[in-house]
Amino acid sequence: MKKLRTNILRFIKRNPLYTSINFTGLVIGFVCVVFIGLWIKNELSYDKFHKNAEQIYRVHRYFYDNNGTENLHLPYVAPPIAPLLKDEFSEIENIARVSHAGMLFRMNDQKVTEPDVCFAEPDILNIFSFEGLSAEDNLLNEPLTAVISATIANKYFNKEYAVGEAMEFFDENGTSYNLKVTGVFKDWGQNNHFRPEIFISFSTYANAVGESELKDWGSNNYETFALMRNKPQQLDSRLDEFINKQFDNGTSWTKIRMEKLADIHFNWYGSRSSIYVLLSIALLILLLGSINYINLNTAIYTKRIKEIQIKKVIGATGKRILSLLMLESVLFCIVSLIVALLIVRVAIPYLADLFNSNLAFSVGQNLNMIALFFILSIFIGLISGVYPANILLSSKKNSSTNSKMSFRNGMVIFQFFVSIALIMSFLTVNKQLDYLQTKNLGLNQENVITVSASPNHIEKLKVLRDQLIKNPTILEVSGSKRVPSQRLADSNGMKASNNGKMEPLGFRVANIRADEYFVPTYEMKLIAGNNISSKTKEEKEYLVNRAAVEKIGWESPEAAIGQFVEYGNEKGRIVGVLENFNYESLHNAVFPIILYKDAPSYNRLSIRINPANLSNTIGFIKSTWQDFDLSGSPFSYQFIDERFERLYQSEKYTKTIFTCFMVLAISIAILGLVGLSLFVMERRIKEIGVRKVNGAKVTEILAMLNKDFVKWVVIAFIIATPIAYYAMTRWLENFAYKTTLSWWIFALAGFLALGIALLTVSWQSWRAATRNPVEALRYE
């Protein structure tokens, strides 16, 4: 071992540049693999905390047009479904409905909004793991009882054991109630999609909303979990039978399905494909570092030929020499991994922020993964060392030179292929993100503030609006059920007049419930007719968008004006047609929309402002809002354009990821080129000297030295272009509205790669071409 250490140190001392390049490339590769490995482990751990995670299912619901096309998929279902499923399926041991809410509590002398609150049925304690609670104690049976997390207990009572304590909360009208704390459970942590901190008994909710709400099949607002230790055979077909028992031919327009708890994160919030893509890119970058190692070790094999031949002369067998060389390679990779682990350990907080993740790196909690990394490093060491080692053991110095060069050239081409593909991907993601942020949505989301609205705000909406409009910096105020950037999840059955007869439409028409000021507040464009009236009329007035006109089959927007429709059993007349607008994310296409007044449902205010003197305007809105608020809720507001921006966080992180990986891949390729070009120049120094003596110009020598590198980049570009085009085309399919894959994206990527290669190589080519030929030929 001492002799091995001496050999390694001697080699490093003789070849510091090549060793540094090899070491840096491998460390970068291992950092990528370690970080992505930790990220994947974190993603796969979602919702696995619960003891029964593999037997827990969530019920979700689909809706369909008459032609069978899915028009809506909801993770929540109607309240009658849970008790009916329990009666129908003996395999369901426990089932619980959950209604989420943000609620106002009193903490000392302040009122605090708690966002992670839910009303849950008692069986929730049997379904999920609540450390510190016993389901047999009937902790959520009685009205006005609650179980809370240890964090909430410490926050409100400065102690973890808060059983028997009372928590005061307020409804929207300011009426206060006292909750009795019946249990405190240990915090669940962040890796759960479902993580309320306060569970209030469902009977509290049922008493408030009444029986009619709990029998409403149209109120799909309840997250519903079931525990099934033995999943039924042909579950989907049995669920279809269940729906058809409730409705005649019900599965023609709606279905329910069971979704495993472990799949929820990937189906709704994450992506399994992201795991495969990121792992592939990380392994590619590690492969690039390994290619540098193979290439440069192969390139400098001539410097060790004499060493190997001497060892053979003094009796060393080829097998022993091969073992020593392979051991050198493995140790080099292990040291690179250890340095990479240290870098990740220090950098993990910054990397977690960069990638919007709650990653942490503890050696004790990741021993299996670290062991796997060491196995990977040994494997990389063996693979990276076997080819150079075989060359060193070759009996003839110049044997198979062409095949060696071809192999080395092929690996350089592969490095440029990966770099060019990543550049193309980065440019495409960046172009699509710019497109999403600049596309005309058909409504103006700039300078619009949205705030919550209590029943009292809505009841006195006209007075509140008049008060706000008195401020010259407030341009318009509107009340609505939802605001742009939210999902259009509300809809009802619609009928339209056809030859004097009202006939049901075979497709979904989403609704926006808003007052007459909604259209001017968001500066939507009326292309026919008028806005809904501010006056109360006997006949219901409706606005529809262009997509609804076209789907219904009216000849033109003008032809739609005056048409009778029935929406949700309310008859009325179309008074105006709006140009299509994107209410949701641009991942979704515009679909038919109907807009009408329904004041009791409003829960948001939209306020268009002049951005001048913003702080004073916000202060005025706050004081006016508080004058009409009975509950004493803290005032909060959001800008609509910022809400839209948050819809594209995934794309922003994708851009960040591609940027980081692209820079790393290019850096490794540059390092490899520096080392390889340096070796080529050293090997051809005498040839260059002879050519200069014979009259060759510097430009001719530069062209001679650079042509191979240019050829490699061109080949890599030809291979990368169709692959990157296919991959980015598939990625863009996630968007209803997308940019075009312009030719300049691919051309720019190619020119960038060529420019990087020429800048890297030309520096050393210039040094070699301008060197005094006497220095190279003085001993010839």
Image (cartoon, rainbow, N blue to C red):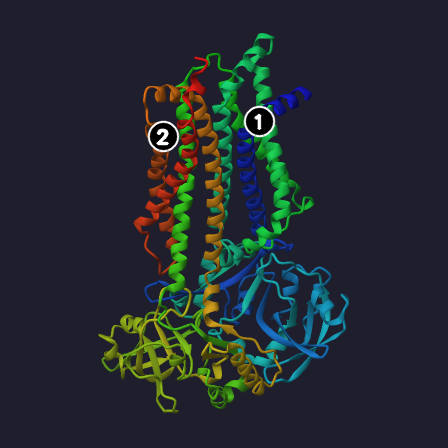
Camera-nearest residue between 567 and 242: 567
Q: CA distance from mark 2 to mark 1?
A: 35 Å
Q: Quadrant of residue 410?
A: top left
Q: Can the viewer see residue 568?
A: no
State the residue at coordinates (57%, 34%).
Answer: 376
Disc marking residue 163 = none
- Mark found first going from the N terminus, 2 or 1: 1
Q: Secondary structure at mark 1?
A: helix
Q: Position of residue 231 (x, y in %)?
A: 54, 54
Relative to 173, say whether 729 is above or below: above
Q: Secondary structure at mark 2?
A: helix
State the residue at coordinates (41%, 58%).
Answer: 433
Task: Select label 2 or label 1 by which is in front.
Answer: 2
Question: Which residue lies under the disc numbered 2?
Answer: 702
State the residue at coordinates (50%, 53%).
Answer: 233
Relative to 301, say whether 410 is above or below: below
| Amino acid residing under circle 1 | Ser
Please rate how many residues cluster around mark 2, counting C-alpha atoms within 10 Å: few if below 14, some from 14 to 19, many from 20: many
Question: Looking at the rendering, in which quadrant would you find the N terminus?
Answer: top right
Relative to 270, say whether 616 is above or below: below
Question: Which residue lies under the disc numbered 1?
Answer: 329
Question: Looking at the rendering, in which quadrant would you find the C terminus?
Answer: top left
Q: Position of residue 475 (x, y in %)?
A: 43, 82
Camera-nearest residue between 270 and 69: 270
Q: Position of residue 10 (x, y in %)?
A: 61, 22
On the rendered structure, is 110 left or right of 519? right
